[in-house]
Amino acid sequence: MSKLYFTEDHEWLNVDGDNATIGISTYAAGQLGDVVFVELPDVGKTANKGEDVAVVESVKSASEIYAPVSGEITAANDTLEDAPETVNEDAQGKGWFFKMTVSDASQLEGLMDEAAYAEFIKE
Amino acid sequence: MPGLLLSGHIMTDDNLQRTPLAGLMEELGGKMVPFAGYAMPVQFTPGIMAEHNWTRENCGLFDVSHMGQAYVCGRDNAATIAALEAIMPGNLAGLAPGEQRYSLLLNADGGILDDLMVTRSLNPADDGRIMLVVNAGFKTEDFAYIAANLPSGITLEQAPDKALIALQGPKAAAVMAPLCADAGAMVFMQARNTQIGGIDCHITRSGYTGEDGWEISVAGDRAEDLARLLLENEAVQSIGLGARDSLRLEVGLCLSGHDFDASRTPIEAGLAWAVPKVRRERADFPGAAKILQQLADGVPQKRVGIRPLGRAPAREGTHIHLGGEHVGEITSGGFGPTLGGPVAMGYVRADLSAPGTAIELMVRGKAHPAEVAKMPFVPQNYYRG
């Protein structure tokens, strides 16, 4: 049974056991506008929580994507390289960025669930 | 994703000035951001890409009222033009009534303080009165510099109560036709006083998107009526500054303060055409000795167009390398929706300025292959009759 979390940086993580899939929220994709480029992390790289591991670029600007937890990158969504618009079309589905292991489950405690995130973006 | 929520609640920021069209822009869904001290729409609901494409295919309406409008006034045209040619390298004496020129405001070293539009009125009653439009971010400095350099008897009258609307795109002429009988007879860089839908205004057939269109100077208190009238045509959509930037970049137009500044001469900036022969011969503009020497001997660095070969945009400030050596920097860069790929301009060592030259762009520590490219990247679509 997987569980969906959100960070204050507008990223989502879908955690299933020790593995997480990460992307940006539908709200973030809407705010960012048309995504024209995504730079993905190298598989096998170890990242600490808060480290910038990927980049998403709209027409206007580049934004960093942080590792929401510490762990090892296990997969990257290569389809975004040729179809970055997938991030706008399906941010919380096919527009995922990368997968990583969750090396310290306690890092999930401070994150928001879907309802809390919905409140967070209303502010 | 820091910086994501760029807009915040700046609409209530007392420190930002509002143009006469700010309320309408908000009503139309404009995402207002601070720009040059004004609250300006960076984009509307369709987003930068859709707004850019709309302007290339239909007609975009831009609020550019933040730009600085002013008149330089002397006893006759010759007196006013002489005063302006003392600080600009353009052939302003060659301006016929109802003509506009792009020119540059130069400092004593030939450095570019700003670029601007210079317009001679078509109306004989306005003889000696030359209109200037300068960039929003520099208008305070520009007007101070101009005023300080005018001889006695020539004055600078700022027009802060006027709004400026840019109507741009291949359908602009069809939008104007039923509202303004004079518009269709104008060609690129012509100007005249007229009425649009009965509203008095001064229009020039020009703009900064590479498309056909007009810039419309209108009293601030009539600007909203005029904008609403133009927006009644279904070919017209309001467009934000985000798309204005990608539109001008694709046609190779400079952004003042980025693609040149006071440390660059017109020759380094690839704007030698703005220093025409008649002025070179007279050598009577600021920095003439330096600029003429550069024309004869070349420059160390030159502004060029750049096409990244991959998909990664290279933004302003990106270092340009060749074989591990630093050879220049990107000054404007992003994604060109009409090109469907990344596009940039910047300065490179002069020996690398030929189109087709391979260079490397250092994006986030990695070298990305790119090529020096001819500008404009997208053909300009001006109406020349």
Image: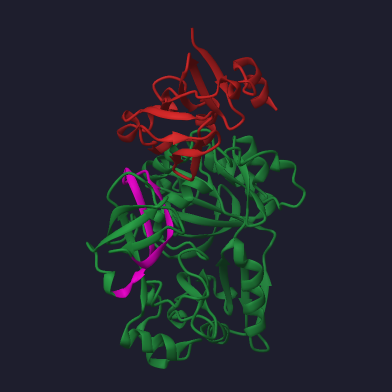
Chain A visual colour: red
Q: Residue B261's x, y, as percent?
A: 51, 71
Q: Residue B21's x, y, as percent?
A: 64, 47
For the C terminus of chain A, the quadrant is top right
Chain ID for green: B
A123 or A52, which lies in front? Answer: A52
Report the side of A118 relative to B319 (left or right): right
Q: Is residue B266 above or below residue A23?
A: below
User: Residue B181: within the magenta?
Assistant: no
Q: Quadrant of residue B227?
A: top right
Q: Residue at x 71, y 53 (%)?
A: B17
Range covered by the magenta-colored residues? B325-350
User: Residue B348: within the magenta?
Assistant: yes
Q: Is residue B125 above or below residue A9?
A: below
Q: Is residue B278 above or below residue B199?
A: below
Residue at the extreme top: A1
